[in-house]
Structures are given as structure tokens and as C-alpha cells.
Amino acid sequence: MRILALIAACLAAPASAQDLSLTETDTLPRLIDSLCVDIHPLNGCEQVILMSRRDDESSADLVILSDRRLADDPSAPLLVLRNATYNGSMWGMSPSLEEGDGRTVLLRSEQSGIGRHPWFQTLRIGWQEDAFRVLGFGYSSYDRFTSGGYSCSLDYDSGEWSAEATWVDPESEEEQSVAQSGTLDSPAPLLSDHGAFAALPDPCRDVQDLFFDNLP
């Protein structure tokens, strides 16, 4: 990974050679994660990069570059998505990247550091119909004070979604649960339309509302 390799080279260099350029000084501290993966029809290994925003550290930018070894213009990005995902300032709040199946990348975010209801979100990103799209979406949360929680999963490849929630009835003190599923009525959304604080998809929002309506 080119940025991580640059960091390693800087750390390994003699003290006299450790001065960074102004561009490096501005860019390297903002690096959150980087992944080299074949996610685009172009030959080679695209570089997927997460960087904290320069003007707002509560979110992160997503950048996808073509393979520097094969591209005519390695500096020309395939995608720049500002405010792509949540990025908190504490442990349990940092987004990350992971290689998925079938030439996809998993963009994970979470807020498990503080609060009663930690949450975890995963976007499965891939190239489809001449654009980067959200091919899958997953979200889950739980209540630290009870044994309840809820989750949802949308798979735009199969066109199916599922959601479930569990909670404890305050009167009977028995655990209640509900499971839902259905088919999606829309194609995989464009990744460029996604944002860090975008509303949850309808199936996720519905099960979230159900959970909180039954929370003691």
C-alpha cells in the first residue's frame, strides 16, 4: 500500500532524512486506513484510502486511485467521496476498510466507545453498471442496559433484505423478538449519493423504530 509504505520509509530513514514535505505533513496524519484491491475494471490494484476530513474530523473522506504502476495519470482519482463515513475522536469510533468477496470492499464504521446504544455499520462497495455502488448494507445496535438489540441487512445483488429485533417486555420480563424480510424495490444506490450521516434505509429504520418503541 503506497501510503503505508511511505510511512514505513519515513520511520526507517535516518534522522537527517526524516523531514516531510508540506504536502506529506498535511496528508499523512489524516490517513485512517488504506487497502490495495482489484475493485475496478481497470487492470491492476486500485488503492482505496480513508482519510479524516481536513475541516471536520467527525467524518472521513473516501478516495479510490487507479494502480500507480499502470495508470497514465496516477494522480487522477477514480472516486473522491467527501464526508463518506463517520469518524469519531475516541476508541471505538474509527472507520476501517476490509477486502470483501467478489472484487468488493467493506467500509466499516462504528460508535461503540460511549453511550447506551453502540452501533456498527458496514457498506459493501463495488463497481456495477459503470459506477461505484453500495452493493450491500448492514447495521446493528444493542442496548447496554438490557439484553435487547436490533440489526438489518440489505443485499442489492440478491434483491433481498432482512431485519430483526429483540427486547425485554417490562411487564412480563420475558424476551420478545421479531424478524422481518422482503425484497428490495430499487437497484444498488450510487456510492456518490452516500454520506456519513445519511438516513438508514427503510427496513433498518423500521426495525430501529420498533426496537425503541418497546424499550423500557
Image: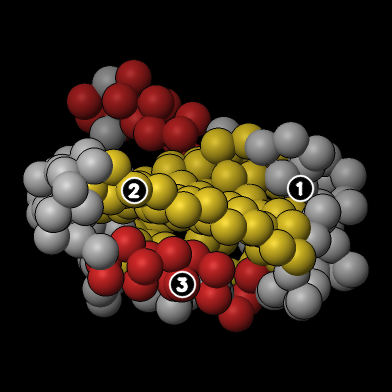
**Distance CA(mark 1)–CA(mark 3):** 32 Å
According to the picture, the residue beneath numbered tag 1 turns out to be 39
| Image quarter (top left, top right, bottom left or bottom right) of the N terminus | top right
Residue type of the residue flagged with mark 2: Gln
Question: What residue is shown at x 82% (from left), y 54% (from top)?
Answer: 158
Q: Secondary structure at mark 3?
A: helix
Counting from the top left corner in percent of width and height, residue 71 is at 81, 53
Counting from the top left corner in percent of width and height, residue 108 is at 46, 48
Between disc 2 and disc 3, the foreground one is 2
Q: Marks 2 and 1: in contact by CB < 8 Å? A: no
Residue 2 seen in the figure: no
Q: Marks 3 and 2: in contact by CB < 8 Å? A: no
80 lies above or below 15: below
Looking at this view, is 34 or 73 the one in front?
A: 34
88 lies above or below 176: below
Crowd tier of the residue under label 3, counting other residues whose Cα lies within 10 Å: few below 14, some 14–19, many 20 or above:
few
Q: Secondary structure at mark 1?
A: loop
**Distance CA(mark 2)–CA(mark 3):** 17 Å
Question: What residue is shown at x 46% (from left), y 53% (from top)?
Answer: 178
Q: Residue furthest front?
A: 172
According to the picture, the residue beneath numbered tag 3 turns out to be 206
Marked residue nearer the N-terminal end (1 or 3): 1
Question: What residue is shown at x 51% (from left), y 61% (from top)?
Answer: 62
| Mark drawn on residue 81 | none
Image position of 185 (left or right of 26): right
| Image quarter (top left, top right, bottom left or bottom right) of the C terminus | bottom left
According to the picture, the residue beneath numbered tag 2 turns out to be 176
Q: Secondary structure at mark 2?
A: strand
Between disc 1 and disc 2, the foreground one is 2
Between disc 1 and disc 3, the foreground one is 3
140 lies above or below 98: below
Q: Quadrant of residue 105?
A: top right
